[in-house]
Amino acid sequence: MCGDVRFTARGVESDFGVCSCKMCQRWGGASFVAVTAAEVAWQGEEHIRRRASSDWAERGWCDTCGTHLFYRVTAPGIDGAGCHEIPLGLLDDTDGLRMTREIFTDRRPAAYDFAGPHERLTEARTLAMFAGGEGAE
């Protein structure tokens, strides 16, 4: 928002996912909607703050304006480790993106739902996925 941090993303997938865990809801006020980017080049990296948010991931934000910049799996052995999950709202072009996975579905507020065909994982299935290292978001 403020422009102190900018990025160029490469290897951005055409699919995106939604996480409705309580941490994501508290972090952003609602479910976290993000696309995976294999490589991200940051400008203004001195303004990025990072925090380990679980045993397997970290979150990053701009220290000037507070914009949420990414969620990144840091634990080795989990599919997608090292990739950045970038909030859709930060992308200049979201045309052609489609939702393929929703995790922590049983934690999503009852006030809204995500329509359409996509994989839906409960908290138990999501945690098992992270523990097993298979297909983690």
Image (cartoon, rainbow, N blue to C red):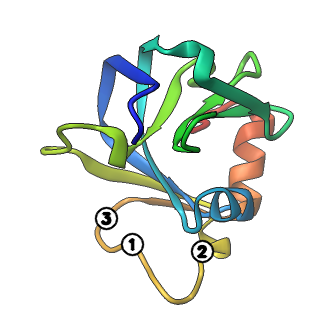
Q: Name the quadrant containing residue 60.
A: top right
Residue at 52 percent across and 26 percent down: it is 84
The residue under the point 34% across, 19% down is 9
Q: Residues within 10 Å of mark 3 (few under 14, many from 20)?
A: few
Quadrant, the C terminus: top right
Q: Which residue is mark 1?
A: 114
Amino acid of disc 2: Arg
Position of 124 relative to 50 (above/below): below
Helix, strand or loop at mark 3: loop
Q: Residue furthest bottom?
A: 111
On the rendered structure, is 97 left or right of 42? Answer: left
- Percent position (x, y) of residue 57? 73, 32
Q: CA distance from mark 1 to mark 3?
A: 9 Å
Residue receiving disc 2: 108
For label 2, the SS is loop
Which comes before the other along the chain, label 1 or label 2? 2
